[in-house]
């Protein structure tokens, strides 16, 4: 996300809420969310977006992009940067989530569809089975102009960590110590959850609770979702469907899915230190090998 390009960005202006919102789909998610809104665009729309992304990045020095299929190790992008440290040695700086998984692989390979072509209604869903009780109708949550989440929906949660000495908060600006460390390394721990109507399922509020007992700000990243796939990539969000992201991010994507009580997600959306109230849109899965790093 940041790296040396951020220095230039900060010289012009401090990273703002607007910048972060755009990167993660606030501006593109729109009112045509998956539930009961516009029909999905045709395949050729996504094909044209992929072609535009290839044309707009070819020969321009863009590094590897994200999201990707974590079950595939293929990648031929030759831009290399060092992996960020383990997240436990970094400060959590932001938490947000996307409706449907942006990544594909593991237990989330069911394509949600093309969506509206601007980040809504696409991505990947949980492959597994949910019981009738877990799928029992309940109120939608995280309602906003961007749509809502329903029981059975999948979300990909991004726990963003920074090497800077920062305090967790809203927007990507919280990951930068302005004027001190404007070029930190970032690592995103990505975990995928499915929303169920079960009071005994995981409590999202607890998963997003922040503490600094270790001297570093941390959240409750689950350790039982398989071995995370680590790779170097970029920022995500539908803003980058047709252009490359210049920012550099170390990713750790867990392959298994956890069940989370939908009511607790709704409660979190009503008030949290990150000022998140809805699910962000998703970027098209990056498939072009020239825009992917090889997973070792």
Image (cartoon, helix red, strand yellow):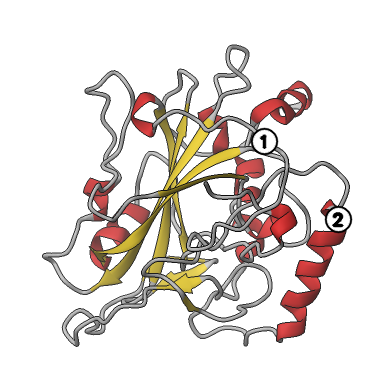
Please count the marks in the image.
Answer: 2
The reply to whether residue 220 is visible in this rendering is yes
Q: Name the residue: 22% across, 47% down.
A: 206
| Mark 1, residue position | 80
User: Depth-wise, is mark 1 or mark 2 nearer the camera?
Assistant: 1
Which image quadrant for residue 114? bottom right
Mark number displayed over residue 281: none
Mark number displayed over residue 56: 2
Please, which residue is most extreme toward the top here?
A: 180
Please, which residue is most extreme toward the left here?
A: 200
- SS type, badge 1: loop
Residues 85 and 71: in front is: 71
Q: Is residue 62 left or right of residue 106?
A: right
Indicate whether 230 appears above or below 255.
above
**Other-residue count near label 1 (Cα within 10 Å), few / some / many at <14 / 14–19 / ≥20:** few
Q: Name the residue: 79% across, 60% down.
A: 53
Q: Residue 84 in the image: x percent, y percent? A: 50, 30
């Amino acid at each position: 996300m940041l790296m040396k390009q951020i220095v230039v960005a900060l010289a012009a202006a401090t990273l703002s809420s607007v910048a972060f919102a755009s990167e993660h789909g606030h501006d593109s998610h729109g009112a045509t969310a998956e539930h009961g809104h516009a029909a999905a665009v045709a395949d050729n729309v996504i094909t044209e977006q992929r072609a535009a992304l290839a044309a707009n990045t070819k020969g321009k020095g863009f590094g590897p992009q994200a999201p990707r299929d974590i079950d595939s190790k293929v990648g031929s992008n030759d831009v290399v940067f060092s992996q960020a440290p383990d997240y436990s040695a970094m400060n959590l700086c932001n938490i947000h989530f996307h409706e449907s998984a942006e990544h594909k692989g593991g237990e989330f390979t069911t394509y949600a569809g093309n969506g509206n072509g601007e980040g809504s209604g696409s991505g990947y869903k949980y492959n597994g089975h949910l019981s009738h009780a877990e799928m029992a109708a309940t109120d939608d949550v995280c309602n906003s102009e961007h749509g809502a989440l329903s029981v059975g929906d999948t979300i990909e949660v991004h726990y963003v960590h920074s090497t800077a000495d920062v305090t967790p908060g809203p927007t990507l600006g919280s990951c930068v110590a302005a004027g001190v460390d404007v070029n930190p390394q970032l690592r995103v721990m990505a975990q995928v959850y499915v929303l169920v109507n079960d009071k005994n399922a995981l409590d999202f509020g607890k998963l997003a609770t922040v503490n600094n007992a270790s001297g570093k700000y941390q959240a409750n990243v689950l350790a039982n979702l398989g071995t995370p796939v680590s790779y170097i990539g970029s920022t995500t969000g539908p803003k980058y469907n047709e252009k490359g992201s210049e920012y550099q991010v170390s990713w750790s994507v867990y392959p298994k899915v956890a069940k989370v009580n939908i009511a607790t997600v709704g409660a979190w959306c009503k008030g949290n230190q990150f000022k998140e109230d809805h699910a962000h849109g998703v970027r098209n899965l990056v498939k072009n090998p020239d825009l992917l790093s090889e997973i070792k």
